[in-house]
Amino acid sequence: MGFVPTMTFEEARACVMATVRAGAREPAVEMVSLLDSAGRTLAVDCKADRDYPAADRSVRDGFAVRSGEPSELSVIGEVRAGAAFEGEVRPDQAVEIMTGAPVPAGADAVVMVEHVDRDGDRIRSRAAAAPGQNISPRGCEAREGDVVLRRGTRVGFAEMAMLATIGCAGVRVYRRPRVAVIPTGDEVVDVTATPRPFEVRNSNAYALAVQIRRAGAEPVILQVARDEYSHTRFLVERGLESDMLLLSGGVSAGKYDLVEKVLAEMEAEFFFDRVKIQPGQPVVFGRVRGKIFFGLPGNPVSTMVCYEVFGRAATEILGGQQEPLLPMAYARLTEPFRQKPGLTRFLPAKLAPAGEQVTPVSWSGSGDVAALARANAFLVTEPDRETWEAGDPIRVLLR
């Protein structure tokens, strides 16, 4: 393998993103229905088909008036959302208007209904109307021809609303990448099996499948690679038929940890094989035969953390996404916390419903799936800090 560096978390993530971007080819494009575009990545820029809003629009219930008019006015009609006022507001006149309705010709302000006194068809305003008051002017959201969603954007609920707004019944999106998953180890048995004391059920493949789908790709789960060179090599060959390969387990320094040996003999290029994080230090990242691969630690929490902070970004880039994000926020600790400096840690934690406070979840190490299932977030520590007091802000990554 030659020399393979150990990296910090930030270095390793930057390395993954730069490497995948440099070698990634633009995915194939396909047309899907609007609803089926959810979670997909746009393959084209999407433009506004008209001005938005298409006319000056009231943002309040009230009265459309001419700014600078006397406080007492005659009400000559009304206009609601979904209709238009056919006439024109002239001096000393007002039109009753509902939220979302187009502003009548001649009016340039809306006085809120709460700010007038009405007596029949006469109103008296308690405050002078300023030009543009309570009006969204035509085109203030987007002009016809403006790019409102850029190529490489993942379609979420807001993007879905925008696509529907501009009339995209069919959407051009990138093909989902296929990500192969190979669990390794003689100790790994099927989820339907009754494991003996020295065996574990194959949880990693299923957890990774969920994470892969959440990243916008299609998981391809292969059989468990046994602790035997030819079987591992055979499955790696099959895995490389997909766009990216994930192996869980077999990346430590033990006698039966064969992943790096197999890949090295296939002339793989290794970019790192250890990262200063917990859990997940012995994570491997490289490229072989033009395909990106990750060798993930076998302990379940390590596997999930390493995919989330490294593998997900690679998956999203392969799927055409322009800016993969690892969204972190700050929350205040509910209790003191201490660590040994030197590593960036991603530890199970419980974020309060309001998102302002976070509590570490007691865990027994990187095999403790039960602790992670009780958590809804990861506490993310700074590697050069040793202690935090209750009330101190700390980074949080949602799970």
Image (cartoon, rainbow, N blue to C red):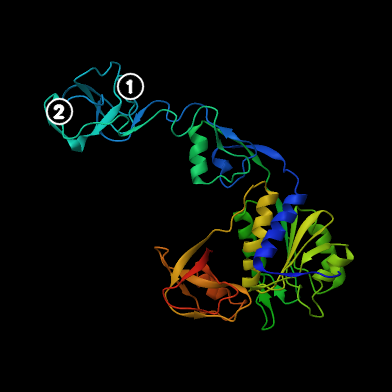
Q: Is the residue 331 above or below the residue 67 in the image?
A: below
Q: Residues within 10 Å of mark 2 (few under 14, many from 20)?
A: many
Q: Is residue 309 left or right of residue 19?
A: left
Toward the left, the furthest residue is 119
Residue 231 location, x and y as percent? 84, 68
- Mark 2 vs mark 1, foreground winner is 2
Per the image, the residue denoted by label 1 is: 84
Cα distance, mark 2 to mark 1? 21 Å
Instruction: Name the side, left or right, on which 309 lies relative to 239.
Output: left
Residue located at (85% from left, 63% from top): 234
In the rendered image, which quarter is residue 272 located in?
A: bottom right
The quadrant of the picture occupied by the N terminus is bottom right
Q: Choose between 342 and 301: the one closer to the eye.
A: 342
Q: Residue at x 46, y 80 (%)?
A: 336
Q: Nearer the viewer, residue 134 or 172?
A: 134
Nearer to us in this view, 238 or 4? 4
Say what secondary structure mark 2 lies in.
Answer: strand
In the image, residue 65 above or below residue 276: above
Badge 2 amino acid: Ile
* Residue 128 x/y as whole percent: 21, 32
Q: Is residue 46 visible?
A: yes
Residue depicted at x 43% and y 26%: 54
Q: Is residue 218 visible?
A: no
Image quarter for residue 28? top right
Which image quadrant: the C terminus?
bottom right
Residue with the mark numbered 2: 123
Say above or below: 216 vs 70: below
Please give left or right for residue 4 compared with residue 367 in the image: right
Task: Give the label on residue 379, or none.
Answer: none
